[in-house]
Image: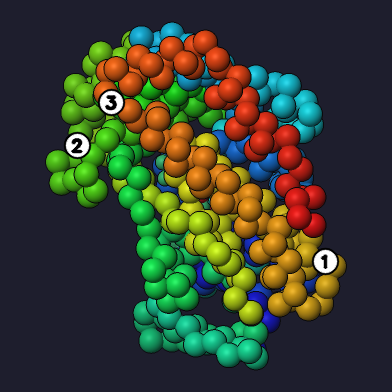
Amino acid sequence: MTDITIIGGGVAGLTAAIGLQSIDSDFILFEQSELLKGIGAGFGLAANAIQALDYLGLKKDIEKLGHKIQSYNILDQHGKILLAPDTQSLHQQYNQSNFAIHRADLHDYLYAQIPKEKVILKKRAIRFEQNTEKITIHFEDGGQHTSRYLIIADGVKSPLRQQLLPTSIPRYAGYTCWRATINNNTINIDQGSETWGKNGRFGLTPLIGNRIYWYACINSKANNRKFKNYTIQDLQTHFKDYHAIIPQVLEYTKDEDIIWNDIIDIKPLKHLAYDNILLIGDAGHATTPNMGQGACQALEDVAVLMDELKQTQDIKKAFLSFERRRLQRTKYITRTSKFIGKVAQWDNPILITLRNFILKHSPSKWSQHSLEKLLKVNFMELNK
Ligand SMILES: Cc1cc2nc3c(=O)[nH]c(=O)nc-3n(C[C@H](O)[C@H](O)[C@H](O)COP(=O)(O)OP(=O)(O)OC[C@H]3O[C@@H](n4cnc5c(N)ncnc54)[C@H](O)[C@@H]3O)c2cc1C
C-alpha cells in the first residue's frame, strides 16, 4: 500500500510531489490528462510565492523561467494611471521579487523534477472510500488505488471535494475571461498593467522569451453561448475604445490561441483536513484571479505542509496543523479577491467615475492595505 496518494497534476499536486520526494515520502500522483502540460497562458508569481519556492529549494530555477515584474499599474480605459501600488518597498521587506511566468514553462519544470513512474496519467478519480486506516480511490476507467493518506489537488471543480462536501460547488463570479500569449517583438511591453473600463478589464504582462500574456474579463451570465464562439475580431470590437495598446495586442493574437472560461471560486471551507485526507490548492480554496494569488497560495500550501511533515511522523497531525495555519489566510484572499473583482467589473458609468475618483485620490487605502496584508505577513509563521 502506498503511503500518500496525490490526485491532480497541477501546480499544487506537482509541487506537493516534489516536496514529498525531498523528504523521502512514499507517494504516487494520478492525473486525468493524457499529457501533463500547462495551458497557453501566464500567471503572476508574487513575492510570497517566491518565498514558498525558496523554502522548497525551487526558487533559483523557477526565477530563471519568470519575467521580473517591477511595477503593475491599474489604468483607466484611456491608459491613465488610477493606481500604482508601491510593490517595490514590499518586495524589499519580503526580500523577494514578483515574477510572471508562462504556465507551460512552470509545468514542464515541475513535472521534470518527478520520476516518471511516480506520475500516472489518464487516471480520472471519481470517488473514494475512507476509513481511519486507508483510503481507496476509484477511477473512471474502473481501476482503483489504496493508500494510507490522500492529498486532493484536483482543482476548483474537484469531484473528490464534492464527495466530502456535497454543497461545495463552484460559484460563478459574474464575469467571463479570455486569455492568450503572443509574441512581444513589435509591441515591446516591459511592465504589467490592468485596465479597468466600462466594457470590462484587460490585463497585460510580459513573459520571458519576448512573449506577452494578456487576459480580458467581461461581465456576462454564466456559460454564455455567445461568448463561447467569440473571436479576436469580436474582442477587438468590444475593446475598440480602450487605449491603443489593447487593440494592438488583440491584432497580434490568433483565434486558435485564445482560451476562454467563466471565472469561478469556492466559498471558503471550514476545514481542509479530514482525518487522513487533505485538500490543497484550488481544490481546497479556489479564489477568483483578481489578486493573482491562486497558484501562489497553492505554493504556500506546499511549503507549509512540508514544514509540518518535517516536524512529525504523525501525518494526520501534520494535516491538522496545516489546516490551522492555512484556513485564515486563504479565506482572506478568497474574500478580498471576490470584492476586488466586483469593483473592477463595475459597468455603471456613475459608479466607475466615483471609483476612479477614489482610486486616484486615496490610493493607499485601496492598494497598499490589501497588498501589505498579503505580502508583509510571513505566511510561514502564521498560526504556527
Ligand atoms: C484567468 C485566471 C488567471 C489566473 N491568474 C493567476 C495569477 O496571476 N497568479 C496566480 O497565482 N494564480 C492565478 N490563477 C489561479 C491559478 O491558475 C490556480 O489557482 C492554480 O492553477 C491552481 O492550481 P491547482 O494545482 O490547485 O489546480 P489546477 O491547476 O486546476 O490543477 C488540477 C489538476 O488536477 C487534474 N484533475 C482534475 N480533476 C481530476 C480528477 N478527478 N482526477 C485526476 N486528476 C484531476 C487537472 O487535469 C489538473 O491537472 C488564475 C486563474 C485564472 C482562471
Q: Is residue 147 visible?
A: yes
Nearer to us in this view, 139 or 374: 374
Residue 321, by quadrant, is bottom right
Q: Amino acid at mark 3?
A: Asp
Residue occupying the point 63% across, 28% down? 369
Q: What x and y, as percent, mark residue 315?
A: 73, 76
The Cα–Cα distance between marks 3 and 1, rounded to whole angstroms, is: 49 Å
Q: Secondary structure at mark 3?
A: loop
Q: Earlier in the sequence, mark 3 or mark 2?
A: 2
Residue 376, by quadrant, is top right
Which label belongs to residue 310? 1
The residue where tag 3 is placed is 347
Residue occupying the point 31% across, 39% down? 175
- Nearest-to-viewer mark from 1 and 2: 1
Q: Amino acid at mark 1?
A: Lys
Q: Secondary structure at mark 2?
A: loop
Q: What x and y, as percent, mark residue 235?
A: 23, 27
Viewed as shown, does residue 126 lie left or right of 65? left
Q: In the picture, which quadrant includes the N terminus?
A: bottom right
Q: Which color scheme is applied?
A: rainbow
Q: Amino acid at mark 2?
A: Tyr
Viewed as shown, does residue 356 lie left or right of 293? left
Q: Are marks 1 and 2 in contact (CB under 8 Å)?
A: no
The answer to whether the residue bearing label 2 lies less than 8 angstroms from the nearest atom of ligand 1 is no
Q: Is residue 215 visible?
A: no
Nearer to us in this view, 275 or 246: 275
Nearer to us in this view, 146 or 187: 146
The residue where tag 2 is placed is 230
Q: Is residue 232 above or below residue 142?
A: above
Q: What x and y, as percent, mark residue 197?
A: 33, 20
Mark 2 burial class by Cα count in 10 Å: few <14, some 14-19, many 20+: some
